[in-house]
Amino acid sequence: MQTVGIESVRPPDVSRAKQTETVQRFKVHLLTGAGEDLSTKIEFSRRGMDAPVLAEPVLPQVLAAYRTAPLILVHYGAQAAARQKVHALMTRRQPEARDLFDLYVLSSRPEMSDLELARTFSREELRQAVERTYSLDYERYRDTVVSFLRNEDQEVYDRSELWVQIRLVAISLIESGLQDEGGDLSVGKAIQLTGRPVFTSREIASLRGSSLSSASQALARLERDGLLIRASRGLWCDVTDPRFSPFLLVAYLAGSHRAYVSFFSALHLYGIISQIPRVIYVASTAHTRIVKTPVGTYSFHRIHPEFFSGFDWYRDRQTFLIASREKALVDCLYLSGRKGKRFGHLPEIELDSDFSISKARQLARRVPYGKIRKYVQGKLDSLVKFQKLRADATTGAIR
């Protein structure tokens, strides 16, 4: 200990040591060469051994931080540690955020996929553990966990949205033990199985093997605790999931109608316009309407079925459908020629080298109404001429 500045150790007062049925704790004072008195404690658990117990070398980066020579320590495996954390959630007088944080860290271990908590705890005990997680808010997590992490780790973990994700992962891990022989999945596990941050009550009910009412009540509980957002009736979002995007809701909000992201929203995603639309514009076979949700406002505009083409998956990720560069622009011109003249005034547009004028003209020729077709072609020609004037100094800006 002298390598880290500890000159001497003041032994504990055994008569004042905490002695319970589950723990034996001794307070120790470490005296440094600078005269500091560092109070710490040594704790022994009396809960018994929980297999598996492993003997492994301490990671080099941990040793380096404490300037310690290589050594091998005996410790609990990930499954045993997780069981102890779940037990702590059930039995502590006051549930601690660190137990959820530890479960979150442990959840990435491969062996956690076969945790089988039901062999150790009753269903009622597991439900109690889940129930107690709801009392742990972000402020408690920040003060009792984040404050004691390394500076570089604090920058990563000191985010309220990450705390929501930590709670969801921990709840899902605990609820995995609630799966019975009939396949009644926990709601957290069912959400994971969808593989998406947007899902419906009906999907969760089907995956759980439960009634729609039961699934809806379970999802509503997660909503009340800030873990999910109800976008509309029966439609839910986990906005803390890094894969989440408001564009993912388009297909769900369209219902039985076809729909794709277009107009100003698509033009912005392609970088053709720099202004960020305040609503998400959608081309659809349904009637024109506005849909307001807690995650965004969606403006649906009806496109003639014969003109409903020119779209594909965004960046080939199969997350949401979006008009091509050319179709998004022609869609704007198409609606500007109809009654109401929506998108009649376009913001500043910059057509890049990926924009094909020839494809845009082909699309304009497919506009179903003769009068509107002629209007769209004229507007497109005017726009192309203006873009070419701006691009005189830049070779190959557009084709």
Image (cartoon, rainbow, N blue to C red):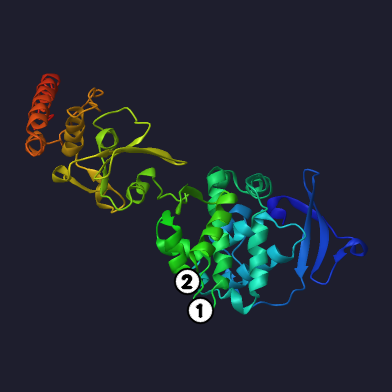
Residue 141, given in percent of the width and then of the height, sits at: 65, 49
Residue underneath mark 1: 182
Query: In the drawing, does residue 205 fall left or right of residue 42?
Result: left
350 to the left or right of 319: left
Residue in view at x 30 percent, y 49 percent: 320
Mark 1 and mark 2 in contact? Answer it, CB < 8 Å: yes
**Residue 295's x, y, as percent?**
44, 41
Residue 262: x %, y % from top left: 25, 39
Reply above or below: 105 against 299.
below
Cα–Cα span, label 1 and label 2: 8 Å
- Secondary structure under tag 2 reads loop
Amino acid type indicated by mark 1: Gly
Q: Residue at x 55, y 59 (%)?
A: 217
Above-or-below relation of 30 to 122? above
Q: Residue furthest right?
A: 15
Nearest the camera: 103 or 153? Answer: 103
Q: Quadrant of residue 293?
A: top left
Task: Inspect the image, locate mark 2, and give the three-letter code of the amino acid beneath it.
Answer: Gly
Judge by depth and name the residue closer to the eye, 315 or 280.
Answer: 280
Can you say which quadrant of the picture contains the N terminus? bottom right
The residue shown at (64%, 57%) is: 133
Q: Is residue 170 visible?
A: yes
Instruction: Name the element at disc 1.
Output: loop
Left or right of 327 on screen, residue 165: right
Disc 1: CA contacts within 10 A as few (<14), some (14-19) or many (>=20): few
Residue beneath label 2, please?
A: 209
User: Which image quadrant for residue 62?
Assistant: bottom right
